[in-house]
Every structure is written in C-alpha cells, then in structure tokens.
Image (cartoon, rainbow, N blue to C red):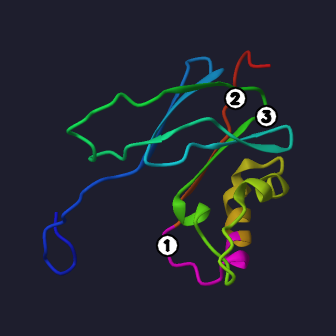
Amino acid sequence: AVDSAGEPHAELFATAALLDFSADGDVVRIVACGQSGPLLLREGRAVELDVEPGTPLGLGLAEVVAPRVVSVRLRAGDRLFLASDGVTEARDSDGAFYPLTERLPGLADADPATLAERVWTDLVRHCPDLRDDVTMLVLAPRPRGGS
C-alpha cells in the first residue's frame, strides 16, 4: 500500500473490536485489538467493560501474545455501543474530552436505531471542529434466556 504521495507506508495496522455472540444470544465474547471495547448500556447506566485494548492487528508480530477474551452475560434490554477514537478523543475548545460514558445514558431511549444519531449531534455540539473520522455502532442483542 502507498500513501497519497506515492510513498510506501512504513506502518500498516488496523484497530478492531471483535464480538462473538453465543447461539442463544445470552453471552458475547469480546477481543479488542488496539480499540476500546463496547460500552454496555444496562438499566439506564453506561458501563465500561473490562476489555483490554490489546495490540492492533498487524503490529507486534515478533512477540505474539494471545489476546484477552472477555465474556459478558447479556440481559434483555442491554445495548452495546462501540465507537472509534474519533468519538472518545474529541476535544472541545478548552481541551476537554467528549464525556461519552457520562452522556450516553441520557441520549439512549427505547429505540437503539436513533442512538448513534443522538450521540453524533451531541458530539458535534461538544466539538464543532471535529477533525478525526467517527464510527459508531449500536448493537441490540436479544438474549433468549438472559436475566
């Protein structure tokens, strides 16, 4: 791969969060590779899951260490919110980071399809001069037996 000037890239890597849902939807297994794990929205709160953002894909190949897998039991009504660092590292004019974990519960409602749009609107209010790319994904699993 080459950059816009035609020069070869010195570093090629990608960050990722991998989620594997059990067949019944009751458990999600999460591996983070240079990317924060999802926030769990449960009972009106946003909970940071204990996911270690391990080595990005394509880096650290000389000393490969198996990534840490975190399993989370899901309950009916849970939502998983994933965001790129364009969201979590956005700063306002005073240099304050966007407080995603604090604001997310107030932006969530019964319709998970509108959550990313609500966060986007709030993010742009916080940081009108946003310069990084932004990616958000809201997952609304439906566990069969989760309590």
Name the residue nearer the viewer: 130 or 25: 130
Q: Which of marks 2 and 1 is in front?
A: 1
Task: Quickly name the residue at label 3.
Answer: 77
Q: Which mark is residue 120?
A: none
Residue 23 within the segment the image draws in magenta: no
Residue at 59% across / 84% down in the picture? Answer: 129
Q: In which quarter of the image is the N terminus?
A: bottom left
| Percent x, y of residue 113 | 70, 52
Task: Quickly name the residue at label 1.
Answer: 132
Task: Quickly name the residue at label 2.
Answer: 142
The disc, 2 or 3, on the residue closer to the chain's N-terminal end is 3
Q: Which amino acid does label 1 sit on?
A: Asp
As drawn, 48 above or below 104 = above
Classed neighbour count for the residue bearing mark 3: other residues with Cα under 10 Å, few (<14), some (14–19), many (≥20): some
For residue 68, side relative to residue 93 (left or right): left
For residue 15, side relative to residue 52 (left or right): left
Q: What residue type is labelled 2?
A: Arg
As drawn, 111 above or below 68 = below
The disc, 1 or 3, on the residue closer to the chain's N-terminal end is 3
For the residues labelled 2 and 1, the Cα–Cα distance comes to 32 Å
Query: Magenta part of the protein: which range?
Result: 123-133
As drawn, 22 above or below 113 = above
The disc, 2 or 1, on the residue closer to the chain's N-terminal end is 1
For the residues labelled 2 and 3, the Cα–Cα distance comes to 8 Å
| Percent x, y of residue 135 | 53, 60
Q: What residue type is labelled 3?
A: Gly
Residue at 70% across / 26% down in the picture? Answer: 74
Classed neighbour count for the residue bearing mark 2: other residues with Cα under 10 Å, few (<14), some (14–19), many (≥20): some
